Amino acid sequence: QVQLVESGGGLVQAGGSLRLSCAASGRIVSINAMGWYRQAPGKQRELVAAITGGSTNYADSVKGRFTISRDNAKNTVYLQMNSLKPEDTGAYYCNANMRDFDYTSHDYWGQGTQVTVSS
């Protein structure tokens, strides 16, 4: 079994910064990709940023403000969020796509961490 544990959410004023962390543990064979999604009240969950190997992908709304990075030795992914806006408010979920011993791939999710940006 695999666990993803997030940390770093909180309340911040507009223009401020937060750094989210997500550590994966358990039976990890290989991690294909890790990423962050967010869900605002009444809205669908959306991709914020993802990292696969050395490649990164960002939602248009966060480009230039958010940076995703990964520490392979620690099986941890980070999301540095700068110049935060009220519309960045939501529950942020860590996602990891992992390859198992039988070469099948599975998605795992963290429990979510709340980010609230006040105006």
Image: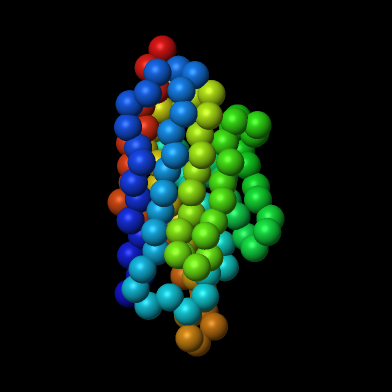
Tell me the residue at 45%/59% (across/down): 76
Q: Nearer the viewer, residue 20 or 37?
A: 20
The N terminus, quarter of image: bottom left
Q: How is the image coloured?
A: rainbow
Residue 61, percent from left and from top? 60, 30
The C terminus, quarter of image: top left
Give above or below for 4 relative to 12.
Answer: below
- Asked if residue 87 can be seen in this view, the reply is no
Residue 103, percent from left and from top? 54, 83
- Residue farthest to the right? 55
Residue 39 in which image quadrant: top left
Residue 113, percent from left and from top? 33, 42
Q: Nearer the viewer, residue 74 or 118?
A: 74
Tell me the residue at 41%/28% (across/down): 89
Q: Is residue 46 left or right of residue 20?
A: right
Give above or below for 50 relative to 107.
Answer: above
- Residue farthest to the top? 119
Q: Is residue 111 left or right of residue 40?
A: left
Residue 71, percent from left and from top? 52, 60
- Asked if residue 95 can be seen in this view, the reply is yes
Tell me the residue at 52%/52% (across/down): 35
Q: Is residue 37 left or right of residue 6?
A: right
Tell me the residue at 65%/47% (across/down): 57
